[in-house]
Image: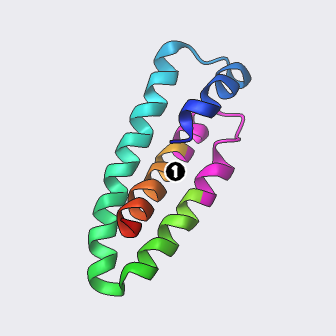
C-alpha cells in the first residue's frame, strides 16, 4: 500500500537498483502473509480489537523503520509494515 508512494524517495536516498526495489515489494508481501497468520491466532485467543491494535502498532513501527539509512533495516521495516497491513485489514474486513 505505502511502497508505491515511497519507493522513488527510498531509491534515491539509499541508491537502490531495480533488484533491491523489487525485493521491498516481496518483503511487504511476505509480511502481509505473516500478518494474516497472526490475525488467525490473535482473533481466536484475544478477539478482533487486540488484532487491530497489534496491526496498528506494527504499521506505526514499520513506518518509522523504513526511514532508516540502511537497506537491510529498511527491508525489515517493510516486513513489519506488511505484518501490520495483513493483521489490520483482515481484522477490519
Q: Pointer 1: what residue?
A: 81
Question: Is residue 75 rendered magenta in the image?
Answer: yes
Pinpoint residue 69: horizontal percent, then vertical percent.
Answer: 72, 34
Pinpoint residue 5: horizontal percent, then vertical percent.
Answer: 62, 32
From the viewer's side, name the closer residue of 50 and 92: 92
Indicate left or right for 71 with 69 as reference.
left
Mark 1 burial class by Cα count in 10 Å: few <14, some 14-19, many 20+:
many
Question: Is residue 62 rendered magenta in the image?
Answer: yes
Vertical placement of residue 6 versus 83, above or below: above
For this orientation, the residue located farthest to the bottom is 46
Secondary structure of residue under mark 1: helix
From the viewer's side, name the closer residue of 26 and 89: 89
Question: At 70% across and 40% down in the image, what residue appears?
Answer: 68
Q: How many marks?
A: 1
- Please identify the quarter of the rendering in which residue 22 is found: top left
Pinpoint residue 84: horizontal percent, then vertical percent.
Answer: 48, 58
Pinpoint residue 36: horizontal percent, then vertical percent.
Answer: 31, 59
Question: At 41% across and 68% down in the image, what residue appears?
Answer: 92
Display colour scheme: rainbow
For this orientation, the residue located farthest to the top is 17
The C terminus sits in image quarter: bottom left
- What predominant SS class does the magenta segment belong to? helix
Indicate left or right for 36 with 16 as reference.
left
Q: Which residues are magenta?
A: 60-77
- Please identify the quarter of the rendering in which residue 25 is found: top left
From the viewer's side, name the closer residue of 20 and 25: 25
Indicate left or right for 13 with 34 as reference.
right
Question: At 60% across and 28% down in the image, what residue appears?
Answer: 7
- Please identify the quarter of the rendering in which residue 73 is found: top right
Question: At 62% across and 59% down in the image, what residue appears?
Answer: 60
Amino acid at each position: 500500500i505505502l511502497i508505491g508512494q515511497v519507493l522513488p524517495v527510498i531509491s534515491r536516498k539509499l541508491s537502490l537498483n531495480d533488484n533491491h526495489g523489487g525485493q521491498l515489494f516481496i518483503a511487504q508481501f511476505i509480511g502481509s502473509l505473516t500478518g494474516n497468520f497472526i490475525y488467525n491466532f490473535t482473533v481466536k485467543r484475544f478477539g478482533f480489537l487486540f488484532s487491530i491494535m497489534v496491526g496498528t502498532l506494527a504499521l506505526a513501527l514499520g513506518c518509522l523503520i523504513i526511514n532508516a539509512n540502511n537497506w537491510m533495516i529498511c527491508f525489515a521495516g517493510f516486513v513489519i509494515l506488511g505484518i501490520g497491513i495483513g493483521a489490520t485489514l483482515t481484522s477490519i474486513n
